[in-house]
Image (cartoon, rainbow, N blue to C red):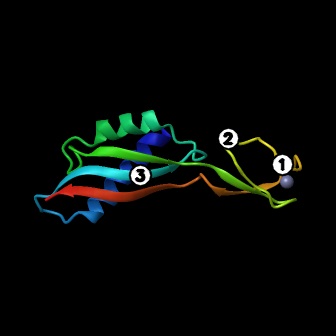
Amino acid sequence: MHELSIAHSILSIAGNAVPANSNTVVSAVGLQIGELSGIEIESLKFAFSVIKSNTLLQNAELKIQIIKGEASCNECKTVFPVSSFGICCPQCNSSSMKIMKGREMRVNNIVVDE
Ligand SMILES: [Zn+2]
């Protein structure tokens, strides 16, 4: 399951960001997920809730911000929103485009309770 490996990488990114052996409690992890990333948000939340127990993220919530997809047409340079693959340029109907935004998945911030 794709989401499970993503949940593991969130755990290790957050783990690296927080000093080991501290009493730090992570209360939230902010994520930015592009709507073209193919990540199922609900599956990711579920996977994260399963693997976070007994880690320093056990009390952490995922705060997910969706990044809207955006593409630039290779023919007419129109920039338009894309919410799924397989659509064409609204201006010239070309299917040749460059995805500008929406494929990312990144850990944006880690919130700790001091
Ligand atoms: Zn176009």
Q: Earlier in the sequence, mark 2 or mark 1?
A: 2
Residue density around tag 3, few if under 14, some if 14–19, many if 20 or more, within 10 Å = many
Query: Is label 1 in a helix, a strand or a loop?
Result: loop
Q: Residue at x 18, y 44 (%)?
A: 54
Real-space Cα separation, disc 1 to disc 3, in angstroms: 30 Å
Residue 84 numbered mark, or none: 2
Query: Is label 2 in a helix, a strand or a loop?
Result: loop
Q: Are the residues at dot 2 and dot 1 in contact (C-beta closer than 8 Å)?
A: no
Task: Pick the residue in front: 83 or 48.
Answer: 83
Tell me: 91 left or right of 6. Answer: right
Q: Position of residue 58 (x, y in %)?
A: 21, 44
Q: Earlier in the sequence, mark 1 or mark 3?
A: 3
Residue density around tag 2, few if under 14, some if 14–19, many if 20 or more, within 10 Å = few
Query: Is label 3 in a helix, a strand or a loop?
Result: strand
On-image quarter of the C terminus: bottom left
Tell me: 107 left or right of 113. Answer: right
Q: Amino acid at mark 2?
A: Ser
Task: Pick the residue in front: 79 or 54.
Answer: 79
Q: Position of residue 1 (x, y in %)?
A: 48, 37
Q: Residue at x 29, y 64 (%)?
A: 16
**60 up-or-down from 71: above or below:** above
Q: Earlier in the sequence, mark 2 or mark 3?
A: 3
Task: Pick the residue in front: 50 or 114.
Answer: 114
Q: Position of residue 12 (x, y in %)?
A: 33, 56
Tell me: 59 left or right of 93. Answer: left
Ligand 1 lies under 8 Å from the Cβ of mark 1: no
**33 up-or-down from 47: above or below:** below
Judging by the rendered image, the residue that carries numbered circle 3 is: 31
Residue 95 numbered mark, or none: 1
Q: Residue at x 38, y 37 (%)?
A: 45
Q: Amino acid at mark 3?
A: Leu
Real-space Cα separation, disc 2 to disc 3, in angstroms: 20 Å
